[in-house]
Amino acid sequence: MDPADPSRLKNGVLSNLGLFIVKGSVALSCGSAAIYASTLYSLSNTLNDVFSLLGLKMASRPADAEHPFGYGKELYFWSFIAAVFMLGFASMGAVGRGLKQIKEQYVITSDILPVLALAIAFLYECFLLKSALARSVPKEVQDSDYILKNYIRLFKRNTNPTNQIMVLQSTAAVIGTGVSLSATLIASWTGSYLFDGLASICVGLLCGSMALILAFQLKELIIGCSACPDTVRLINNLAMQVPGVTDVPKIKTMFIGSHSLLVNMEIKVKSGLDIESIEDINDEIEKIIKINLGSVRHINIETFADDMVQDWKRKTDFYFKSKTVSEVM
Amino acid sequence: MHSTGYKALWIALFANLSVFLTKAIAAWVGNSAAMFSEALHSLSDLVNSIFLLVGMKLASRPADMEHPFGYGKEVYFWSFIASVFMFGVTSMGSITRGYHQIIDPHPIEAVELLVIALSLAALFEMYAVRAAMSAVLNDVGVQARGFKAIAASFKNINNVANPAVKFVFYEDFAALVGVVIALIAVAISKVTNNIVYDGAASIIIGIILGVMGVMLAYENRDMIIGRAAHPNIVRRIGDIAMRVPGVTDVQEIKTMYIGAHSLLVNMTIETKPKLSIEYADDIVAEVEKRIVKRLNIVKEINIEVVADDKISDWQKKRTELNELDKH
């Protein structure tokens, strides 16, 4: 379930490196642009995982005085660099190679071995996609029979964005290898030079658009996007369960790492309570939220008295704000 | 950001555009690699100011449900993209061009035009450096004039709190150095009739651009990750809170920049254990009011109240901040 699990990334580096070597040697042996593009794709996936590992390493440093909320966003920063590399190097390289292949009208020589190697790579990537899906959709809501249903559910923006990135990458890898496999087959069937180059351009474009989607998602995370409405509602419900809390006017959340969420909330409590009981209430809320939501790392709770007379003005102010919160939730 | 800030940026954009066009035409006519690198240098400055404008425009959007803390970090994001461009396109481009000039030299022409264009650019950059130096001196509060100002700004550059001021200083200084190198290289190439100097200058400018790109990326990385306010600001926040009647101690202050002009403050204050919530509520409101009034930069503030534990955390924290400030 943890998308930024180092062991997953290490496996990712190894398997993508393996794919890179297999595809690279096939591309060298038969001079196919499509397989070359697919090789570049595997290389960029390998680098992506390496950068994620690096980012994770940097992100795991404890918070210090200069960075009191920790280094969680390092992961996004390094992933963003990987996305730029993917766009600038892998995508441009594949498109350029495809254009060259078409211009030179190069006919590829292929036999059973490269096709076999690619088919194995394709199957392996399908397997990787399946395991990525299984990791990213929580067990409780998983329908093991309907992969597509899980897939759609994942993109309804109710999961950790890092999961979406991971699944998107695996999907694009499957499509990319599929395209180059079929292009190789068609090319050897028809003996035409065109398909190989076209497939290479297609893979390059796919890689480029993946990089753009990735960059866009990462941009959201870098700027500071909130948790999904479901999570905010859950936080609200949990806080309301604690005895003494009468209202939760405001909850603000922001991802500050792949697995750490900042929560700033305001609560109202029964009037007449003293500070010691308020502290107990706050501790209780923090405890219950942290138990239920593992990703919440920082909570700050501002407490207000629930009294209509003294704070009437502030209360009306809150009324409008709480209305907008409930509208979206 | 206010309209005056935008105006300054637009002026910078048009200044960079005209400098870029001048240098590009001179490089095209004179066929000089050093001039080409200088044109790329101005191009990256131009791109930088365009992205800064885009970032500021996007950052000024109000907070919404998806981004409850606002869009302030857009500025750093776009600035980061500009640094990637600076590194990948302009730095690599000018190093490649210099390499080609060395292995396959083309004689440079219209040296007079090149010298005039570069001298004008040098004057322009000197003006920019002067402005950047006075910004540095302003920031640290040192009075100096003439050549003393140059020495003073170099001595104090590490004490500057505002990272943008620091970066602009380095950037303008690097631009001036680049122009001077190009000028010298063109002159030497003409006198000795050896084009290698032209190519070497292009490579040196390319390396300077690359270093600047990495520095800019590094600066933005810190802001993207979530950097705390300067210890001075944290200390002021704590002191303001301590002066509010009813606050017995400040247990914790966590700050993070969520934009160029907005700071998030999460703090925990202590009050007497038996105080009722109505009073505590007013104390919190008072603390918030005072902090926001004194420090305009504080845009988000959340204060948790706990009972006094008889340990003076703020005393300890304050000495820690003083220590941190000294480094």
Image (cartoon, coloured by chain):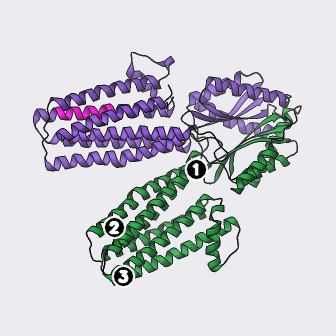
What is the spatial separation of the Cα atoms under label 2 and label 1, in whole angstroms?
A: 34 Å
**Which mark is first along the chain, 1 or 2?**
2
SS at badge 3: helix
What kind of secondary structure does the magenta stretch mostly adopt?
helix
Q: How many marks?
A: 3
**Where in the figure is residue A186, as x and y percent of width and height?**
16, 33
SS at badge 1: helix
**Where in the figure is residue A74, as x and y percent of width and height?**
53, 43
**Disc 3 chain ID:** B
Determine which residue is flagged by label 3. B113
Question: Which residue type carries mark 3?
Answer: Leu
**Foreground of the two, B299 or B143:** B143
Q: Which quadrant does the N terminus of chain B fall into?
A: bottom right
Residue A243 sits inside the magenta stretch: no
Where is residue A267, by image quadrant?
Answer: top right
Residue B302 visible in the shown view: yes
Where residue B98 is drawn, which disc sits there? 2
Taking the image as shown, residue B131 lies to the left or right of residue B269, namely left
What is the spatial separation of the Cα atoms under label 3 and label 1, in whole angstroms?
A: 43 Å
